Image (cartoon, rainbow, N blue to C red):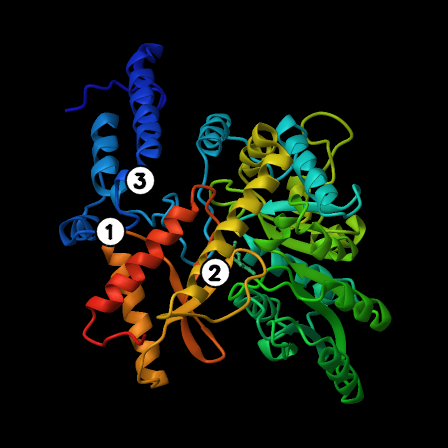
């Protein structure tokens, strides 16, 4: 039986007595702050124990309620220790932000407010407009640019592809007629993230309409090849409409030659989109801003606050230079969503005019909290710190006779591998793949893998503000130690 008494007429506490709930809330807050304060004492990641997994898979639908304290105990026992581990300084896999306590607290405020940012006239909408304006400003785009917060860069890139296709001659008409016989083709380096290909798929353009351009030895788009492919496609009767440059590729962190791509887009009359999922935020660093200046020429930009800006998941962002074209791609007129000149239904354009979602949460609050509490200067220093840690690891990989650096380090991603004496590439690939699993299961560090030039490599993305030089050294030590313990001896 529950100690908690909820009212029979609402889901709030009975008799409007909030004291027990307040006490429980404080317990939860203390537990999470304690947990954040002691991250280093625990493994980066540990597998979900079988009993707990089975418990989730077999749990019946709860018909009767349980005490919130019991619910929290469940969470603390069965979820808290077995999450991804991306808050931990030893987490270097994929590209995950580490989050902050400030972001966590802002999430609580946002949930307490329970605002719906699909539209209407209220302060939360103004907060989102403000953070979009701030984002446009730091990226060198006009203050008048349009944009919205979304789940992540996958959605942001998708929205940009839709806006770009509808900005074509008769593009808005395609909203009613569909693509029909149009042969719109887009261009991106072959190192482009898979979500751009998915965007072409979802937009009905087809993945074959995304043409992949070769890269140079630094894994940057070969712009001469881009020009040639556009010319060949035009000659074949296709309709080039979009070129995507990546600021920070997912494999190696390479930055495409955005300035040159912008020039091609301009000369060819193509929409210039930048996928800056994690890398775009390096504009906050004085060191990297020059390499990213051409983002300011983009027609649209996708990036994530939940990666390098450390805002808790999820917080992606899309910005479109031309607000009219942005709205023209999504706006509808529906009687049950009619806009008024005053009252709560004022405040057009609404965010539901700028993307596929109608109901939307208050993601902007945790972005606002992060930007205002830390300031862009401090966040830029954090970006520099991550890149310094990455350079430290790269130097170590070059120095260690048993390690091999596999790609240049332009930002915060280090690709390396343990090289084996016998040089059999297939054996070496599987050795490194198994080694990464060993490392993840050790709880010491969690890098991931990718393939560079066909070879499997250990990939460490330093995105977490908590990761230090000592942490990457510990990871490298563990790699060498686990490699020595595997039956195959490492070369030397
Ligand atoms: C992470 C990433 C994406 C996808 O972003 P999500 O937020 O995971 O949807 C797209 N492009 C690049 C370069 C990325 O690193």
Identify the secondary structure beneath mark 1.
Answer: loop
Instruction: Report the side of 385 relative to 129 (left or right).
Output: left
Provide residue 222's location: percent of width, then percent of height: 69, 76
Mark 3 sits on what residue? Answer: 40
Q: Nearer the viewer, mark 2 or mark 3?
A: 2
* Res 293 quadrant in image: bottom right
Provide residue 155's location: percent of width, then percent of height: 57, 56
Instruction: Report whether residue 63 is seen.
Output: no
Quadrant in which the N terminus is drawn: top left
Q: CA distance from mark 3 to mark 1?
A: 14 Å
* Disc 1 CB within 8 Å of nearest ligand 1 atom: no
Provide residue 85's location: percent of width, then percent of height: 34, 47
Q: Earlier in the sequence, mark 2 or mark 3?
A: 3
Identify the secondary structure beneath mark 3.
Answer: helix
Above or below, 141 relative to 229:
above
Q: Nearer the viewer, mark 3 or mark 1?
A: 3
Front-lying residue, 363 or 179: 363
Front-lying residue, 188 or 476: 476
Identify the secondary structure beneath mark 2.
Answer: helix
Q: CA distance from mark 1 to mark 2?
A: 29 Å
Mark 2 sits on what residue? Answer: 395
Q: CA distance from mark 2 to mark 3?
A: 25 Å
- Alpha-carbon neighbours of circle 2 within 10 Å: few (<14), some, or many (≥20)? few
Instruction: Report the side of 130 relative to 483 (left or right).
Output: right
Mark 1 sits on what residue? Answer: 46
Front-lying residue, 299 or 383: 383
Q: Earlier in the sequence, mark 3 or mark 1?
A: 3
């Amino acid at each position: 039986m529950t100690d908690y008494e909820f009212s029979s007429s609402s889901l709030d506490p009975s008799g409007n007595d909030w004291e027990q709930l307040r006490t429980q809330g404080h317990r939860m807050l203390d537990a999470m702050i304690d947990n954040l304060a002691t991250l280093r004492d625990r493994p980066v990641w540990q597998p979900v124990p079988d009993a707990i997994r089975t418990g989730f898979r077999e749990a019946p639908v709860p018909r009767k309620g349980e005490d919130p304290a019991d619910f929290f105990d469940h969470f603390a026992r069965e979820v808290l220790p077995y999450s991804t581990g991306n808050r931990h300084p030893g987490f270097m896999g994929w590209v995950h932000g580490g989050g902050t306590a400030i972001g966590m607290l802002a999430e609580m405020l946002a949930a307490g407010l329970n605002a719906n940012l699909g539209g209407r006239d209220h302060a939360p909408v103004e907060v989102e407009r403000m953070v979009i304006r701030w984002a446009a400003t730091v990226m060198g785009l006009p203050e008048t640019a349009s944009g919205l917060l979304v789940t992540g860069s996958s959605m942001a890139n998708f929205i940009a592809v839709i806006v770009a296709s509808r900005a074509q001659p008769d593009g808005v008409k395609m909203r009613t007629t569909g693509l029909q016989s149009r042969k719109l083709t887009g261009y991106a380096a072959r190192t482009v993230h898979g979500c751009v290909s998915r965007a072409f798929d979802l937009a009905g353009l087809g993945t074959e309409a995304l043409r992949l351009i070769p890269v140079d030895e630094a894994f940057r788009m070969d712009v001469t090849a881009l020009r040639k492919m556009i010319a060949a496609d035009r000659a074949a009767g296709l309709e080039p409409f979009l070129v995507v440059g990546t600021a920070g590729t997912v494999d190696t962190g390479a930055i495409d030659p955005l300035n040159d791509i912008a020039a091609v887009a301009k000369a060819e009359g193509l929409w210039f989109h930048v996928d800056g999922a994690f890398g775009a935020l390096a504009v906050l660093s004085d060191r990297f801003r020059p390499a990213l200046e051409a983002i300011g020429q983009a027609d649209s930009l996708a990036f994530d606050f939940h990666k390098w800006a450390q805002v808790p998941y999820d917080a992606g962002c899309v910005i479109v230079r031309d607000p009219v074209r942005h709205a023209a791609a999504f706006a509808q007129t529906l009687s049950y969503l009619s806009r008024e000149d005053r009252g709560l239904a004022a405040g057009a354009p609404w965010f539901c005019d700028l993307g596929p979602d109608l109901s939307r949460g208050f993601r902007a609050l945790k972005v606002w909290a992060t930007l205002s509490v830390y300031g862009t200067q401090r966040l830029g220093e954090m970006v520099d710190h991550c890149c310094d840690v990455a350079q430290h690891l790269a130097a170590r990989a070059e120095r260690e006779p048993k390690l091999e650096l596999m790609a240049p380090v332009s930002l915060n991603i280090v690709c390396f591998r343990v090289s084996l004496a016998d040089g059999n590439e297939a054996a070496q690939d599987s050795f490194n793949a198994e080694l990464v699993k060993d490392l993840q299961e050790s709880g010491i560090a969690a890098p991931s893998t990718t393939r560079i030039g066909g070879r499997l490599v250990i990939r460490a993305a330093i995105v977490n503000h908590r990761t230090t030089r000592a942490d990457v050294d510990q990871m490298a030590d563990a790699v060498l130690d686990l490699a020595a313990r595997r039956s195959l001896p490492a070369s030397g």
